[in-house]
Image (cartoon, rainbow, N blue to C red):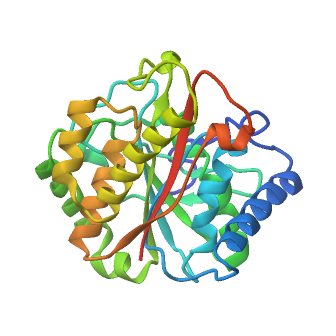
Amino acid sequence: MVHEGTFPMRKAWYAGSWYAAEPDLLRRTITGAVQQVAESNGGNSHRGTARLAVLPHAGLAYSSRGIAHLVVHAPKRIDRVVILAPSHTTAIPDDTLSFGLFSGFDTPLGSLRSFMTRLESKGPDVTIPLQREHAVEMVLPFLAYLQEQQQAPISVAMALISRVTDVSHAARIAGELVGALGEDELESSHTMVIASSDFTHYGQRFGYAPFGVHVDEKVQQKVKQEDVLVATALSRSELGPLFLTQRMKRMTICGIAAASVLSALAKRIDTSGWVADYYTSLDVLGEQATDFVAYGTILWR
């Protein structure tokens, strides 16, 4: 356990901009998204089934629906969560988990504790870029909400990983996580690992428009087909075809490295996954635009 005062507290940098800073309003955002997901599941919450998760990280106006699956499918008790995310601002060495060192994590719904995985020395210290990395922050209010619900503390560790060069490195990193966190802890769901990733960023603004710059229903359907193919491969731990597709088509899935490590981890602990959700920013906005971002949720039992 990290002692308070040893390392800095990670502030809720995006509270008041990417999501509500007022606790009651934020809590309503979360409960509304959870209710939407629960209703789409026919009222069956399946609590206790999720051990690993790929979750989106856009502002909560867009990502709350995708992240809400974490609450709907949460174990009865979570003790620790490791968040793996891409870096949007800082170059990160390939094939390496780079951790930040914090005393805890602020959210408008209360603070979360920090813990150390014993892997912190394997990569460079990324505490400073993690302070403002949005890819790790959007899930924190949901973890604080779960902490309220279970009335027991949840401890968090977070690391950046922007590129995995081949399947063997994904498997190696997954093995390191199992060794550090404990296979029994992962199998019991008391320790969860979350990969933070949005799916395809489409349009000229993102430098990715292989199906044409005019975004219509046909383009959206082609993007969905590609994304669901990748998400399904991840859920089944079929990393060979996934990596080939990623390199050949230059898809813009920002957290593909983190998601690939999670997929290799699922294979290592022999757990099955499913694509729980898929939607786009156009679905949220209810209107057309010249570009869009897709969001997906993958869960492993």
Quadrant location of the C terminus in the rendered image: bottom left
Which residue is at the front of the view, 15 or 231? 231
Outermost residue, front direction?
Answer: 218
Residue at 67% over, 35% down? 13
Identify which residue, 28 or 298, lies in the foreground: 298
Residue 109 shown left or right of residue 132 in the figure: right
Nearer to me, 201 or 11: 201
- Count of marks placed on residues: 0
x, y (%) of residue 34? 71, 66
Residue 128, x across and y down, in percent: 48, 31
Residue at 51%, 59% (x, y): give it.
156
| Front residue of 165 and 1 | 165
Determine if residue 57 is in view.
yes
* Whether residue 93 is visible: no
Q: Quadrant of residue 87?
A: top left
Q: Which image quarter: residue 194?
A: bottom left
Q: Residue furthest left?
A: 168
* Whether residue 162 is situated above or below residue 182 in the rendered picture: above
Residue 65 locus on image (x, y percent) = 66, 55
Question: In the picture provided, is 94 more to the left or to the right than 36?
Answer: left
State the image coordinates of residue 82 (x, y, percent, origin top left): 43, 58
Q: Image point 76% across, 33% down: which residue? A: 17
The image quarter in which residue 177 lies: bottom left
